[in-house]
Amino acid sequence: MSQDHQHCLARIRAHYPQFSTTEKKIADFILKRPEETIHSSINGLSDRLGVADSTVFRFCKRVGFKGFQAMKIALASEIMKDSSHDRLDEGDTPTSIASKVFRSNCKTIEDTLMILDEEDLMRAVQAMETARSIEFFGSGGSGIVALDGYHKFIRTGLKVHATLDSHIQLMAASQMTDEDCAIFVSHSGSTKDILHILDIVKSTGATTIGITNFAKSPLSQQVDIPLFTVSEETDYRNEALSSRIAQLTLIDTLYANLLQIRETKGQESIRKMQEAIKSKRG
């Protein structure tokens, strides 16, 4: 399947923060009424929204499609695929439910990969690799992801820290310097406690990285390097729970890239960790 037949809604959501007012008007209509969009002509949609045909055409090009028809095909394909496995039916067996959950998780990861910005990814990796220390921040479910980041990155030999206690997070934030790096995990990007910690970290001059949903949020607008996830609510889980899969995968991606950069240093750190665990078991 070609790229023009995939991830239409994900592309629109990913580009949304950068859209002009007119482009957001088009995007809002497509996101809220995808079925109606599929059955519209470019003239019908432009008349409905009060914009020029050329504006709709440029919008389609902006999100990566050759034209309006190509976007409609992608949109139709995406809707058909989603409707077939996101809904739980009364007669579903445990195995069929498992299949729907697995497919939905795979889609979350695929959509997130689709919008991953390679330049921002490498900026994040370089910031972490050169930092004196790395601090992970998150609360609630995102706090669990932050702890997972700590669990992984401690293997690299870099100095990393994480805690779920909000007061200790504030204390740690206040002690950072411009040689450090802070990673903020938040699905909504608008959690007050996390934004307060972000303000403190920014005042220290430390580099800030955000892992958050694509929607325009205070966190995504204020961090130095934003990394975005894409997730959708289904009838058996909410959007925030879905995003955790993508957040964990982004953490894995940063970890794998850092290990590749650090080469022998990273492997030596892993060897030391494995020997320490073995000695404990012995």
Image (cartoon, helix red, strand yellow):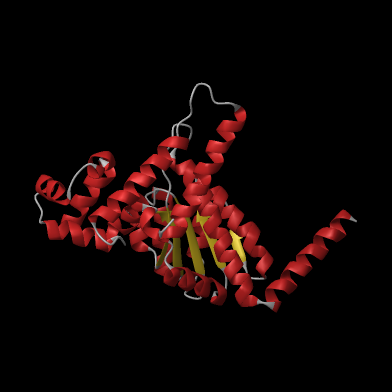
In the image, residue 4 sits, relative to residue 103, either above or below, namely: below
Between 229 and 175, the residue placed more toward the observer is: 229
Horizontal arrangement in the rendering, residue 109 relative to residue 159 (left or right) = left
Residue extending furthest top?
90
Residue at 22 percent across and 41 percent down: it is 39
Residue extending furthest right?
282
In the image, residue 210 sits, relative to residue 124, either above or below, namely: above
For the C terminus, the quadrant is: bottom right
The reply to whether residue 124 is visible in this rendering is: yes
From the top left corner, tell me how far across and down residue 86 is, in percent.
45, 36
Between 132 and 7, the residue placed more toward the observer is: 7
Q: In the rendered image, which quarter is residue 95 located in? A: top right
Residue at 20 percent across and 62 percent down: it is 58
From the top left corner, tell me how far across and down residue 170 is, in percent.
49, 56
Residue at 45 percent across and 69 percent down: it is 118
From the top left corner, tell me how far across and down residue 104 is, in percent.
50, 42
Between 72 and 87, the residue placed more toward the observer is: 72
Horizontal arrangement in the rendering, residue 187 relative to residue 258 (left or right) = left
Q: In the rendered image, which quarter is residue 128 located in? A: bottom right
Horizontal arrangement in the rendering, residue 152 relative to residue 24 (left or right) = right
The reply to whether residue 168 is visible in this rendering is: no
For the N terminus, the quadrant is: bottom left
Q: In the rendered image, which quarter is residue 156 located in? A: bottom right
Q: How many marks?
A: 0
From the top left corner, tell me how far across and down residue 234 is, in percent.
43, 36
